[in-house]
Amino acid sequence: MTTGSPRLEAQAQTEPQGPGRPRRRGLLPVLHADSVRRLREGVFTAFRELCLRAEVRVTMLDAQALCCGAPWRAKGVTEGYEVMRRKVHAEIVMPDQLPIVTDASSCTRSLAEMARHWQVPVLDVVEFAADELLPRLQVTTPLGSLALHPTCASTGLGINEALLEVARFICDDVEVPLSWACCGFAGDRGLLHPELTESSSREMATEVNRREYDGYASVNRTCEIGMSQATGRPYRHILELLEEATRPVAG
């Protein structure tokens, strides 16, 4: 999440795209509260570093006051949703329209629904990484093994193949539990009713904990929290692991 200037440029060289046109993407981390924003600094920082490393230019939007609208919509607070929809529209609809990239799969899904009539392409950061970053990155420190948790949103968006592509780029031993299901965190429900996550993820947690993995990853912070609580393992966004696995080796 950026603060201050509404649009901050990541300082990276770009490849021309057509006659003198740089490759650019808009990044909208769709988060609205300081406490939530701190939870996502890991993937946001990783994404920014990966773009610099891959020499892909992006425009960082200041989304501090914006949200994908899911909290209002899920609770039936239509007036609040419409207020936020207007605020988001004012920020992401541009004369020279850029695709909008978000860094949490549930936000990607909700923003895509919000923007479906705006002619604004909305991409998840995992899709962007698979298409734009992986061809320009080199793995220097591969993971030995990785437990991967796709989310309900990534499944609904149809981006699990991109997720697997990123995971297999950094690790030859990637496992999705055969008992994969919704972790049960469900937005803020897991914070208010942790027994929901405990019940929903019990079978997955048992399967994951049958062995040790070098990494544990997902694509949405609340799901990462839920799976971390269920398994006792440190789930992180897959882009954080991608950033670590492609860091240049000193010397």
Image (spheres, helix red, strand yellow):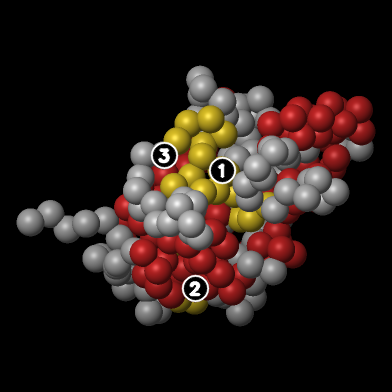
Q: Are marks 3 and 1 in contact (CB under 8 Å)?
A: no
Q: Secondary structure at mark 2?
A: helix
Dot 2: few (<14), some (14–19), or many (≥20) neighbours within 10 Å? Answer: some
The residue that mark 3 highlights is 10
Label 3: element kind: loop
* Residue under pointer 1: 27
Residue at x 39% of width, y 52% of height: 14
Amino acid type at circle 3 is Ala
Q: Horizontal and vertical percent for residue 25?
A: 55, 48
Determine the secondary structure under disc 1.
strand
Q: Where is residue 65 shown, x and y percent of the image? A: 66, 25
Residue 114 screen position, x and y as percent: 81, 45
Residue at 47% x, 68% y: name it.
166
Q: Quadrant of residue 251?
A: bottom left
Instruction: Indicate the amino acid at tag 1.
Output: Leu
The answer to whether residue 14 is above or below residue 84 is: below
Residue contact between numbered discs 3 and 2, judged by CB atoms under 8 Å: no
Residue 201 rendering spot, x and y as whole percentages: 65, 62
- Front-lying residue, 10 or 110: 10
Look at label 2 and name its amino acid: Glu
The quarter of the picture where residue 37 lies is top right
